[in-house]
């Protein structure tokens, strides 16, 4: 059996503002600590490339994706099956060609404030659907790297696998 390919990082960091453009214009968005704590317990998230649904690489349900909220933000650890398609993604991350992450979510609970023409959504709770490895993220401090040096994530991943 071949060794899995491991990548990890932060899908987003708390209290970072992102400029979002949608069909109603531009606004700013910011996630508060604890935004996904309830959602990640459900273990129904997937990992994608650029939010493309046909590129699901891993899932929390299968024990390949471990998510954890810590003091910095939403951290993750992904174990990719060692095959040609996944090695391509792994190598893009390793070589620094793709080094960011984006989140897909729904059912957000937020407070909206307005200063002049600027709107800010402070997201308190949201249902995390997926994380995507991307080139151009909304949250610029997101990061993905090869390996995992987060001991808490490693331990949680081992416990999750034992419970499957």
Image (spheres, rainbow, N blue to C red):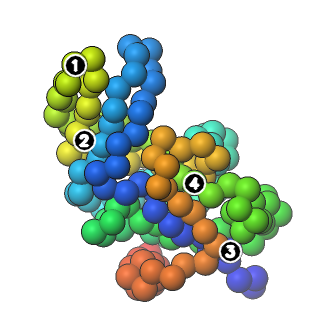
Which residue appears at 51% of the width and 82% of the height? 149
Secondary structure type for disc 2: strand
Secondary structure type for disc 3: strand
N-terminal of the pair, mark 2 or mark 3, is 3
Which marked residue is nearer to the observer: mark 3 or mark 1? Answer: 1
Which marked residue is nearer to the observer: mark 4 or mark 3? Answer: 4
Structural distance between the alpha carbons of marks 4 and 2: 21 Å
Which marked residue is nearer to the observer: mark 2 or mark 3? Answer: 2
Label ID, residue 116: 1
The answer to whether residue 74 is above or below residue 82 is: above
Label ID, residue 100: 4
Q: Residues within 10 Å of mark 1 (few under 14, many from 20)?
A: few
N-terminal of the pair, mark 3 or mark 1, is 3
Secondary structure type for disc 4: strand
Q: Which residue position holds label 2?
A: 123
Q: Residues within 10 Å of mark 2 (few under 14, many from 20)?
A: many
Q: Is residue 64 visible?
A: no
Question: Can you give x and y, in whole percent of width and height, for residue 47 in the image?
Answer: 56, 54
N-terminal of the pair, mark 4 or mark 3, is 3
């Amino acid at each position: 059996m071949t060794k899995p390919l491991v990548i990890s990082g932060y899908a987003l960091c708390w209290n970072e503002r992102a400029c979002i453009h949608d069909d109603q214009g531009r606004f700013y968005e910011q996630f508060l600590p604890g935004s996904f704590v309830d959602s990640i317990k459900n273990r129904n998230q997937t990992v994608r490339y650029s939010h493309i649904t046909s590129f699901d690489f891993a899932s929390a349900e299968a024990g390949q994706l471990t998510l954890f909220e810590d003091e910095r933000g939403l951290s993750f650890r992904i174990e990719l099956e060692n095959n040609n398609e996944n090695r391509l993604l792994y190598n893009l991350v390793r070589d620094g060609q793709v080094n960011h992450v984006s989140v897909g979510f729904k059912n957000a609970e937020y407070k909206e404030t307005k200063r002049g023409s600027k709107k800010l959504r402070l997201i308190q709770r949201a249902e995390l659907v997926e994380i995507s490895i991307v080139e151009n993220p909304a949250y610029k401090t997101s990061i993905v790297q090869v390996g995992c040096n987060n001991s808490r994530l490693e331990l949680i991943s081992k416990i999750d696998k034992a419970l499957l």
